[in-house]
Image: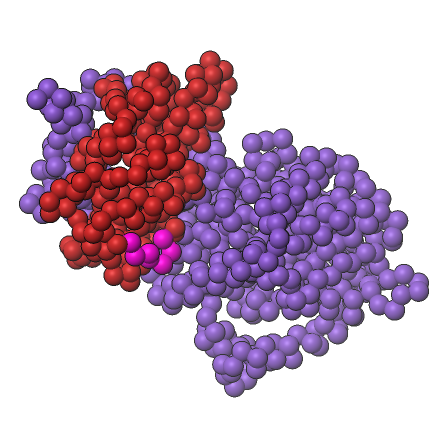
Amino acid sequence: MQVQSMHFKARAGQKLADQRLQRTMKKFSTKFVGARVTAIAELDDFEGTRDAAIERRMRAIENLDVWLDILEQEATRRGATVLYAETAEQASKLVVEIAKKHEVKKVIKSKSMVSEEMQLNRALEAAGVTPIETDLGEYILQINDNEPPSHIIAPVIHKDKEEIADLFAKVHNKPRLTDIPEMTREAREVLRPHFLSADMGVTGGNFIIAESGSVAVVTNEGNEGMCTIVPPKVHVVVTGIEKVLPTLADLATVIRLLPRSATGQSISNYFSLLTGPRARDEKDGPEHMYFVLVDAGRTGLIGSEFQDMLRCIRCGACMNHCPVYQKIGGHSYGWVYPGPMGSVLSPSYVGIEKTLDLPQASTLCGECHVACPVKIPLPDLLRKLREKQFERGLRPGVEYLSFAVWKFVARRPALYRLATRITARVLKLMGGRQRLIRTMPLASGWTDHRDMPAPSGKTFKEMYNERKSA
Amino acid sequence: MRVGLLVTCLVDVMRPEIGFSAIKLLEAAGCEVVVPSAQTCCGQPAYSGGNKAAARELAEKLIHDFEGLDYIVVPSGSCGGTIRTHYDDILAGHPTLLERYARIKPRVYELTDFLVNVVGLDKLPTPASGSFRGTATYHDSCSGLRELGVQLQPRELLAMREGVELKEMDQARACCGFGGTFAVKYGDISTAIVDDKCANIHASGADAVVLGDLGCMLNIEGRLRRLGDHKTRVLHVAQVLSGDT
């Protein structure tokens, strides 16, 4: 996906003005949040499970090379091929090469955000291979002229039913349906022949398990099974190298948190644990299985102050709970990963200069940190990115100037007292009789939509000293 | 018990009366209140703006101004949160400062947290005649709630205030959209967020929204007034508890 994060402000403005999107986002903002509360209450020891999950994820991240070696050994021993890609482009190239090697004409895909990083569909099409998205949300986006997803687990959350009904009627060239089960049936009818005629299935990987060389895939539609077991002769897993977990027991711990934090489900409708290609005595499964494990910036985070980000389990709870995301939706962020986790990842993966708004466009309210099942200190990481911008001279000159003046004054109590007295008086005057300031220079962002309640004209310190001497 | 009051920049300039309400409450709890006259700012704006060096200089100044007192009390969750939860990071790599900070850190409190959990205030000052009576809804300010665990304390204290009835709003713990300079840099997003807060305040039917942080206060009041609501009062929890307003 092309980076569009430099247009954040303009895009966010458009999204705020889009009444239809605002209605859709309003519904969304309470749905997952409410369901999560119920789902986590089912666990006897939610906090203990979180701590265990953190410990297990960090154990993998801190010795990533070791666990990847074990994964490779175990997967290879079971007949799979493990390939590594340093960049997203290389990863795409590898998948295209696999497709060519097996003379693949059509690829069916289960949901994968890493494949969005890779722009895999575009690469496949360029090589004459047809990719078909089979996750319902991703399918809707694909038939809408390859629109990018706006949420990592609910890619089409920005669309309402009516919009999808219009799209289906147009693209499927059938009478417009508005009943959701009927619409789903129609999509299924379109997808079914693709499942049966595809040569290769591509899935993401929620986790890859070192001790057994397996991939774990969670879906609500079962399409991951259709992409891997039923017809295709080749299954390719594309996922990030940081998704490794040492053991199946670790997976059992982490998977208790994933659907609960994501959609508020106790368990996802489908869960596949796929290990190796079809063995001689097995009746189903692909003939060939590949892992394409993608770095694309991840190793750069190891040992850095952003290392905690690597334990992310991609549940989307941070964006579900983010007051900013809830208003502007995922497309405003301009790259693959939106919301708080995306605002930390995008600068690291595509460059701090291209993503200047992302760490700034947060109130640092802390709700993402509260909701994160693996307690990633997202507000702290966003603040650290702000520090990097500041240190590298990437902020507007006026910010440096105002900080310099403010610091100079705040370190000198007598000057500070004078400056605050003047400020209090000026603001009082600006407030007029109503004691409300309607416009302020350099602060139109505030006063365009809000008044600034004016002060009474004297500072606390002045009044305190007056009262003391009285 | 000598309690240092960190007035905070915004109370100093925008709402000095809140500082006096805080003093009244602390004195009602039997504290000797000291207001160090050299105090300025805790460094929060610099820290949030990515200017850690400036934040460190002001953190050092604050430590210097307040060390030696038994407690440091702040009528603001975000300033309290900065000092209590972020100074370790702000002062990282400066062992002498960290050592001095370690001595004051456990003695830094948000006002209502201090009144409930340290001094156990059991009787509020007698309210002034004409002070606020009616229904109030409490907005949980982000830093106070999530960095300092301030949630029950203000509600417990408000329950003691005669003539004030607490009416919870929906989404009381949701951010109001202030976020410091965020409110200016991304004014339109900030406004969309505060609109939800205003709608929840209105839906609660309360006469006043009560809160514990000046940023939220100016943001919510500013938006309510622009929307033409000149009736709903926006009050700091200290003003209601002291019975001054």
Q: In front: A354, or A275?
A: A275
Horizontal relation, residue B219 to residue A137: left or right = left
Q: Is residue A277 magenta?
A: no
Q: Position of residue B244 (x, y in %)?
A: 16, 40
Q: Position of residue A424 (x, y in %)?
A: 15, 32
Note the chain letter of the red one: B
- Identify the magenta region: B166-172
Q: Is residue B171 magenta?
A: yes
Q: Residue at x 52, y 39 (%)?
A: A377
Horizontal relation, residue A422 to residue B65: left or right = left
- Above/below status of A148 relative to B142: below
Residue A323 shows in the view: yes
- Residue A365 position by quadrant: top left
- Above/below status of A403 relative to A445: above
Determine the main secondary structure of the stretch shown in magenta.
loop
Q: Position of residue B240 (x, y in %)?
A: 22, 44
Q: Residue furthest right?
A: A281
